Amino acid sequence: MKTDADIRRDVETELQWDPSLDERGIGVAVGDGVVTLSGRVTRYADRWMAEDIAKRVSGVRAIANDIEVAIPKVGERSDTEIAQAAASALSWHFELGSCDIKPVVKDGWVTLAGQVRWGFQRTAAENAIRYLTGVKGVTNNIGVKPMVKVADVKQKIEDAFRRQAVLEASDIEVNVLDGQVVLKGQVHSWQERDDAARAAWAAPGVSKVDNQLTVRPS
């Protein structure tokens, strides 16, 4: 089993190895398999990217992302400019063109509100905003309008798990209440954990996924 020192070294190496991220302002601390990311980055996308990269490392049990976004003067945009860019990004996105989503911007922080029919559209809206210049963070308050019965949602998710060879359906418990899905159990990696959440979001009528799956110690 990896020690905390091993995990820290591997996370730092993975951050350095990925060419899409400037890791020089990011600090890594590890305690009992829990990785804490600290420091500053110049883009909100980099904060999210650092967390995603840390998930790749085996032995990571959980991640606390304390990285701050400090946008340099040259990259600053007014709230009006960010709002206009966000509205355009949402309207031009082929999966979101017909959705009623409103971005509200305050001090560079974007809050998304509205309703969509599918969970993947909720995620797609946040992804469309994440890489815009000047964005310091995103709060996703988009709701998903339920369209099917709770029993049908649960069955569709469990069927999806069984179809995907990378997921062990017997180790994942699915609970559904009013369109909100809770996943419990253990998986072998962060990739499996994310795959399970994506499969749950793909079911019609899912408004929220509470992913409580834990990663087995390696």
Image (tube, rainbow, N blue to C red):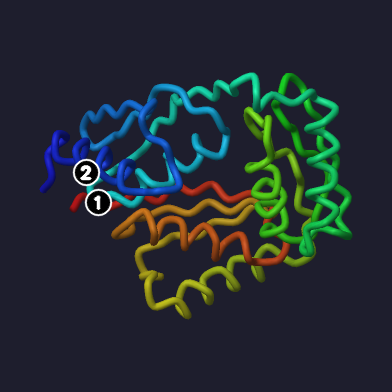
Q: Secondary structure at mark 2?
A: helix
Give the CA separation, mark 1 to mark 2.
Answer: 9 Å
8 or 147: which is nearer to us? Answer: 8
The three-letter code of the residue at mark 2 reads Asp
Please name the residue shown 31% across and 48% down the image. Answer: 17
Q: Dot 1: within a 10 Å radius of its alpha carbon, few (fewer than 14), some, or many (20 or more) residues?
A: many
Q: Secondary structure at mark 1?
A: loop
Q: Quick check: 43 left or right of 105? A: left
The three-letter code of the residue at mark 1 reads Ser
Which corner quadrant of the image does residue 44 belong to?
top right
Please name the residue shown 58% across and 54% down the image. Answer: 181
Note whether 213 is above or below 169 in the view shown: above
Callouts 1 and 2 close, C-beta under 8 Å: yes
| Residue 218 coordinates in the image, percent (x, y) | 18, 53
What residue did someone put label 2 on? 10
| Residue 20 coordinates in the image, percent (x, y) | 45, 47
What residue did someone put label 1 on? 58
Q: Quick check: 92 left or right of 14? A: right
